[in-house]
Image (cartoon, grey):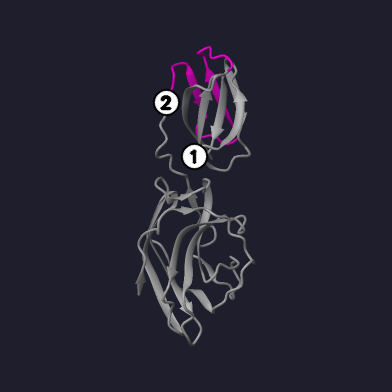
Amino acid sequence: MKTKITMLGTVTAVLFSINVLVAQNDMAIGNISAGWNTYNQSTGVITGVYFDVLNNENSNPGSFDVKVYLVDPLDYNISYAVWIYTDGDGQGGNTVVTYDNIDIDFNATSGIPGGQYRLAVCVDPDNAISETDENNNCLFISPSGNNLTYNPSTAGINDVQTNDGFSVYPNPATNRINFVQENGWENATVNIMDISGKNLKSMNLNLQLTEVDITDLVAGMYIYQVVDGSGKVLTTGKLIKE
C-alpha cells in the first residue's frame, strides 16, 4: 500500500486539455474503491482522499505520474491539478495499489477560480476525462451531481477599515451589487478583483449610488477596492458572488 499525505510543494493551476496524450502504459484508475473523508468549503481542504491504481501489464512499466484534478462539471476541458505524485519505481505487473490518507488544500494551488467542481484522478499520462470511456486513464472520485463548492481563501489580504457612510449591498449577490457612498469622494473608482489581485471590473463611483452588473462573474469570492484619482486606496472589502 502506498500512502501520500501532503502536497508536493505549491502547484500552479493549469488547464487540462483532453484528447492530447495517449497512454504509453496500460495503467488505469480502478473503481474498486475511491472517495474521501471530509471536505471543508470554508478552508478548501479535502481530507482522506483514496483511490486504486491498476497495472494491467505483465511487467513493471516504470515511472509514472498520478494527478488529482478539480474539474468543471459543465466543461471537462477545464480542470486544475491540485495534487501530483511521481512513482519513480513504477508498479509491478497485474497489480492493484491503493493510495490513501491524501489531504489536499485547494488554496495551495494558485489560479483556481471559485465555483463548482468535481474531483478526478488520472494516471500515466493524463487522458480524456469522461464518464463512460473505459479505455481512459481517469476516474471521477466524486459522483455526478455531488459537486464541491470552492471559495478561494482570502488569507493574506489586508482589509482597509470601511469608512462611515460607505456601504455595499446585497452581499452575497447574484446579478448586481450596489455601492453607496456619502463621503463626497470625487473622481473615485471602484475596482472588482479576483483574489490574485487581477482587476476584472472598474467603474467610476457616483456620489451616491453606483450599480455594478456581476452576472458575468463565476460564483466565488472577490475583492472590491475604491481608489481616488491618484490611486490611493480609500476602502476595500470582500464580495461573494452566488
Q: Residue at x 48, y 19 (%)?
A: 166
In the image, 33 versus 102, the foreground residue is 102
- For mark 2, give the secondary structure: loop
Residue 177 highlighted magenta (yes or no)? yes
Give the side of residue 154 with respect to residue 201, left or right: left
User: Which quadrant holds residue 126?
Assistant: bottom right
Which image quarter holds the C terminus? top right
Residue 227 highlighted magenta (yes or no)? no
**Disc 1 and disc 2 in contact, CB within 8 angstroms:** no
Does residue 63 sit above or below 40 in this rendering?
Answer: below
Which image quarter holds the N terminus? bottom left
The outermost residue toward the top is 184
Count all numbered tags in the image, as a single digit.
2
In the image, 89 versus 149, the foreground residue is 89
User: Which quadrant holds residue 190?
Assistant: top right
The residue identified by callout 1 is 195
Mark 1–mark 2 distance (CA, rounded to whole Å): 15 Å
**Residue 236 percent across, percent down from the top left:** 47, 27
Q: Residue at x 36, y 59 (%)?
A: 6
**Residue 42 percent across, percent down from the top left:** 41, 45
Which residues are the magenta region? 161-187
The residue identified by callout 2 is 160
Q: Which label was assigned to residue 13?
A: none
The local crowd at label 1, few if under 14, some if 14 to 19, many if 20 or more residues have their Cα within 10 Å, is many
Which mark sits nearer the N-terminus, 1 or 2? 2
Q: Amino acid at mark 2?
A: Val
Does residue 96 sit above or below 140 in this rendering?
Answer: below
- For mark 1, give the secondary structure: loop
Does residue 183 sit above or below 88 in this rendering?
Answer: above
Q: Main secondary structure of the magenta part?
A: loop
In the image, 142 versus 153, the foreground residue is 153
